[in-house]
Image: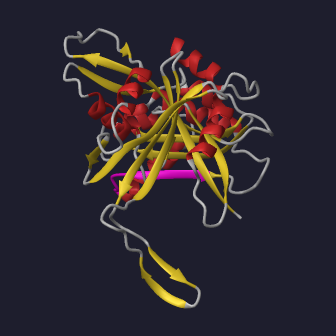
Amino acid sequence: MAYRKVRFEYYHVVSRRTDDGVNQRDRLFDLVEWMNAARALSLAARTYDYRSERVRLDHAYWDEDFEFYFLHFVRLRDTNIPSKARTNSQVEAFELQDDEFLGEEVSALYDSSNNVLMLQRNKYSLGPSGIEEYLNLVWNNDNETIYLRPICPPNSFELARDADEYRKINIRFADLNVATRRTYIDNLRSPLKTLLQGFEEYEGLNAQLVITVGNNRGVSLHNETIMDTLTDIEENPEIFSKAEIAKKDDDSARVELIDLFEHKAHDFATFRMEARATLNHFRIAEEMWSIYSPKEECRNRQRDINQYLRV
């Protein structure tokens, strides 16, 4: 049986007008009004060219049972088409008719109470920047631009320090040939200091370090060393271009990957994939609701997201 892991990210839907001052805060944007405008268009009229392909909103609706809005976007692909094969014949081309495409889908949950969009990530379909561009194409307002602002926990380092287990740390160093880097390296307190001093002997420009406990369950990287490493990264960001850490809050919790520099609020869900079947929008929508809904007290990500927005 095959399984698919899907990532969800959270964005604040806002807008800015051409006459807004530099120091003026973003305006909250009512995505329900946008959905009404989009649904008034035919499927063809709300299909737009995007990076040599086409994209569209397939449908958007209010779910009476889940009590949230849901959107379903699709990227219409007609390039890099796979082949098809049978057990008793050779592989052959998978041919599409002139008006046929492969649909790469993305689902979203919209919470109108706080202007939050919970967005599925699918590397083959539209990402947040593509969704943002599509929203503006449909809105077609020269005086107003819609933005999806990533929602982030208030302090990723404090979040990283609060854990029972550390499963992996992934660090990418900034250019190592800059003389001023040596001053920062001398101030480090973790084993990164020795590692960086050793890297200099290679006379390389960049380096990446990944340390993991592997597949062993119930074990962790050394806690005090991780604490020192987090402090080094936080106090000397000039040395690093990337830093991620995978942690578990307790034995029953899932492993959470934290990007220390660009940590977005996110969740994962795992779906069982049936043979000859696609992962359809409604299965994804139900799982999004179970993660986000305040009615699901054990998860209730709406509560967490609201706290992040108040900071």
Q: Position of residue 77 (x, y in %)?
A: 36, 58
Q: Position of residue 274 (x, y in %)?
A: 67, 62
**Residue 14 drawn above or below residue 57:** above
The quadrant holding residue 164 is: top right
Q: Position of residue 248 (x, y in %)?
A: 71, 38
The residue shown at (65%, 28%) is 66
Does 186 sit left or right of 306 as displayed? Answer: left
Pick the front one: 198 or 220: 220
Q: Quadrant of the N terminus?
A: bottom right
The residue shown at (53%, 20%) is 154
**Residue 4 drawn above or below residue 304:** below
Q: Is residue 204 magenta?
A: yes
Range of magenta residues: 203-211
**Residue 183 drawn above or below residue 90:** above
Q: Position of residue 143 (x, y in %)?
A: 20, 19
**Residue 178 drawn above or below residue 18:** below
The residue shown at (35%, 38%) is 129
Pick the front one: 299 or 213: 299
